[in-house]
Image (cartoon, grey):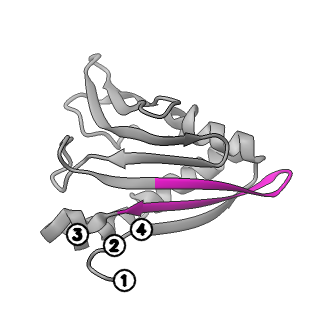
């Protein structure tokens, strides 16, 4: 891995048809995203992923406030989703900061889907890169989040 190719990559198999896996990851995003994972000033009421290219990815606080996370760059149901992660190393939304998350869904069998996850461009975190990557790879990061998604998709 070079300094310009820093990414967190995860592959998991979900016990769900591809359409359902995609739908739970996107439309059902709020059902598996933990309430503890928010950056706004208020507690998290809802995590929203708008289902279209150009859509917003954001949170709504219990007080009605909204806090951006990024934007939907690619919307190709049920195979592929790409969003920007515009949350910087201080866990704040920054419109000038941007990494990308790509999620691919591949049908392995009628009720089995392989999910290929990549959060890339992490070298943009600069001095915070090592700590951020370790966090993303932890149970509190993408590892645990994707497990929660897989459980929701299999339900």
- Helix, strand or loop at label 1? It is loop
Q: CA distance from mark 4 to mark 1?
A: 11 Å
Instruction: Evaluate whether residue 99 shows in this view.
Output: yes
Q: Earlier in the sequence, mark 4 or mark 3?
A: 4
Q: Mark 2 and 3 residues: CB-CB less than 8 Å, in contact?
A: yes
Q: CA distance from mark 3 to mark 1?
A: 13 Å
Q: Earlier in the sequence, mark 4 or mark 1?
A: 1
From the viewer's perspective, is the residue at label 3 or at label 1 nearer? 1
Q: Which residues are magenta?
A: 102-120
- According to the image, label 4 marks what residue? 8
From the viewer's perspective, is the residue at label 4 or at label 1 nearer? 1
- According to the image, label 3 marks what residue? 129
Q: Earlier in the sequence, mark 1 or mark 2?
A: 1
Q: Residue at left 60%, top 55%?
A: 104
Question: Which of the 4 quarters of the picture holds residue 38?
Answer: top left
Q: Earlier in the sequence, mark 2 or mark 3?
A: 2
- Helix, strand or loop at label 2? It is loop
Q: CA distance from mark 4 to mark 3?
A: 11 Å
- According to the image, label 1 marks what residue? 1
Q: CA distance from mark 1 to mark 2?
A: 7 Å
The residue closer to the viewer here, 93 or 141, is 93
From the viewer's perspective, is the residue at label 2 or at label 3 nearer? 2
Question: Which of the 4 quarters of the picture holds residue 60?
Answer: top left
Q: Mark 1 and 2 residues: CB-CB less than 8 Å, in contact?
A: yes
Estimate how packed mark 4 is, as few (under 14), some (14 to 19) or many (20 or more) residues with alpha carbons within 10 Å.
some
Is 5 drawn above or below residue 100 in the view shown? below
């Amino acid at each position: 891995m070079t300094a310009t190719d820093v990414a967190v990559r995860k592959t998991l198999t979900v016990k769900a048809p591809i359409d359902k896996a995609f739908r739970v990851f996107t439309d059902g995003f709020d059902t598996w995203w933990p309430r503890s994972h928010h950056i706004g000033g208020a507690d998290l009421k809802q995590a929203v992923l708008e289902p279209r290219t150009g859509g917003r990815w954001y949170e709504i606080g219990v007080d009605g406030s909204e806090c951006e996370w990024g934007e939907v760059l690619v919307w190709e149901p049920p195979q592929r989703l790409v969003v920007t992660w515009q949350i910087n190393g201080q866990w704040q939304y920054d419109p000038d900061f941007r990494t990308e998350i790509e999620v691919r869904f591949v049908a392995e069998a009628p009720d089995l889907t392989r999910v290929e996850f990549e959060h890339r461009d992490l070298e943009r975190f600069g001095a915070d890169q090592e700590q951020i990557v370790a966090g993303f790879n932890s149970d509190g990061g993408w590892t645990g989040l994707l497990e929660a998604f897989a459980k929701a998709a299999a339900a």
